[in-house]
Image (cartoon, rainbow, N blue to C red):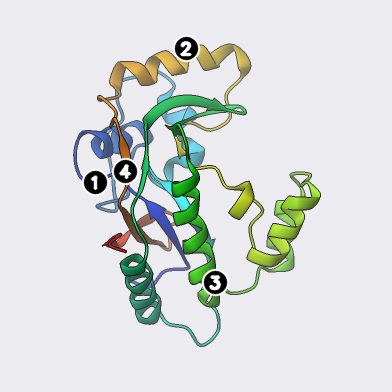
Amino acid sequence: MSYARFAVYYLPPEGALSSFGARWLGWDVLTGRAAPHWPEPGLEAVTQTPRKYGFHATLKPPFRLAEGQTPEALDKAVAAMAARCAPAPAEGLEVARLGSFLALVPQGDTAQIARVAATCVEALDEFRAPATEAELARRRAARLTPEQEALLSRWGYPYVMQAFRFHMTLTGRLDPQDRAAWQDSVARHLPPLPQPFVLDQVALVGERADGRFELVHRYPLTG
């Protein structure tokens, strides 16, 4: 299958957490198939925005292939990068409110996780086509800080490197009065979270013609 864009994600390994994420969002990024939602009224609506990406944490944001690059070359480059990159530990994962949405985030020191993300962004940048003017304008509509503007200009995305924050999105934007209730809903279905959490693999994913992302290949971090 050909893909419009690629990205590098962290995807939980097959198991209780990945199954939870697929059913919570309604899309299984591992299989590229719709998943039945948990029976929570309103869940389909509050997960509409993150659904197409699947349950994941972004390490290298979605990008179009640069002219002259191929998916096969990208696959080899991600494998080589993963072979040089050491796993990244953290104390665990927890549910948190990030602005107006809910996500799973790491506990404790996240410097090693940020190292992995920065490696993905920098080592694979030759495969990224430059952002179009429309893409830049869409990002700038969020009223970026000067630092974020500089990151957008250099890397094509404003929330990388020093602005990066590892998170696994659970909802779209929530009204303030609804956030506590949805946090309770997450807790009812969420399996025990890893303590500690180790980012020990990365995944190349592709955006299909229907706009949804699916797994292309996993790579263990063995550096």
Residue 102's mark?
A: none
Closest to the camera, between mark 4 and mark 3, is 4
CA gap, disc 4 and disc 3: 25 Å
Residue 125's mark?
A: 3
Q: Earlier in the sequence, mark 4 or mark 1?
A: 1
Closest to the camera, between mark 4 and mark 1, is 4
The residue nearer to you, when weighing 216 against 207, is 216
- Name the kind of residue labelled 1 in the image: Pro
The percent coordinates of residue 141 (x first, y second) are: 77, 48
- Name the kind of residue labelled 2 in the image: Ala
CA gap, disc 4 and disc 1: 11 Å
| Residue carrying label 4 | 198
Please say if the residues under marks 1 and 3 sit with CB atoms less than 8 Å apart: no
Closest to the camera, between mark 3 and mark 2, is 3
Please say if the residues under marks 4 and 3 sit with CB atoms less than 8 Å apart: no
Please say if the residues under marks 2 and 4 sit with CB atoms less than 8 Å apart: no
For image coordinates 31% across by 68% down, the residue present is: 83
| Residue carrying label 1 | 13
Q: Is residue 196 left or right of residue 172?
A: left
The residue nearer to you, when weighing 50 against 164, is 164
The percent coordinates of residue 104 (x first, y second) are: 43, 32
- Name the kind of residue labelled 3 in the image: Asp
For image coordinates 59% across by 74% down, the residue present is: 129
- Name the kind of residue labelled 4 in the image: Val
CA gap, disc 1 and disc 2: 28 Å
| Residue carrying label 2 | 181
Label 3 sits on a secondary structure element that is helix
Is residue 150 among what the camera can see? Answer: yes
